[in-house]
Image: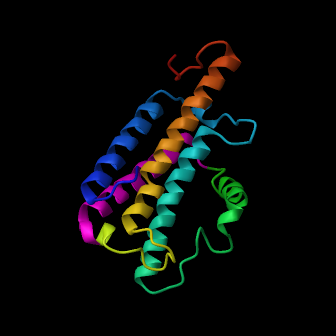
Amino acid sequence: MAAGNKDDLLAVTRKEFAKLEKLFAACDERSAMAKDADDTSIKDVVAHRAHWIELFFGWYEDGLAGKKVSFPAEGYKWNELKRYNADLRARQAGLGWAEAQGHLRAQHRKLVGFIELASNAELYGRPMAGAKNDWTPGRWAEASGPSHYRSACKYIRARQKALRRACGRAPSGISQ
């Protein structure tokens, strides 16, 4: 169930990120960089989550400024997310594991700071400007932050399990 107020949004954002941080601690660079059958790695998923928080801030700022808001991004439609995500992975291919984690941590701090500074009315009192739907800034923030943290945790756990099966044991940095 989506958060409906600032306090709940802040709590879920912190809670879901803490779960993700625990998984980071159990994952070494070799495992994080290993590609799955879809040519995606744990590092890719983490970098992707950081990028979506950046997108949220772009949408929010463009809407407040009265600019056209491009969802999900300029030149892409929502039904083209597979292509967008593949293009994003290509743009982020040079990132290392530590850099991807650092980028997500920085974006998480920015998101928490935004939530802390915003009033409940700013987060939940009206639809987000430029969004062309009834989602509030708080709902968009949750979709870009804690909801994405949950899906990243799910991917990382599944990937770690697959790596353990492939190796017949836990690769270094992945606890059993």
Viewer-closest of 81 and 32: 81
- Please tell me whether residue 87 is drawn above or below residue 1 in the rendered image: below
- Please tell me whether residue 60 is drawn above or below residue 153 in the rendered image: below
Residue at (64% x, 50% y) in the render: 94
Viewer-closest of 171 and 56: 56
The answer to whether any part of residue 118 appears in the image is no
Measured from the top left, where is residue 37 in percent x and y? Answer: 75, 36
Read off the magenta span. 95-121
Task: Give the quadrant of residue 160.
Answer: top right
Residue at (50% x, 73% y) in the render: 133
Residue at (71% x, 35% y) in the render: 36
Magenta stretch, main secondary structure class: helix
- Please tell me whether residue 78 is drawn above or below residue 46 in the rendered image: below
User: Outermost residue toward the top?
Assistant: 168
Q: Is residue 96 magenta?
A: yes
Residue at (59% x, 38% y) in the render: 42
Measured from the top left, where is residue 172 in percent x and y? Answer: 56, 20
Measured from the top left, where is residue 64 in percent x and y? Answer: 40, 81
User: Outermost residue toward the right?
Assistant: 37
Measured from the top left, where is residue 78 in percent x and y? Answer: 65, 65
Task: Give the quadrant of residue 163.
Answer: top right
Q: Is residue 79 magenta?
A: no
The answer to whether any part of residue 1 appears in the image is yes
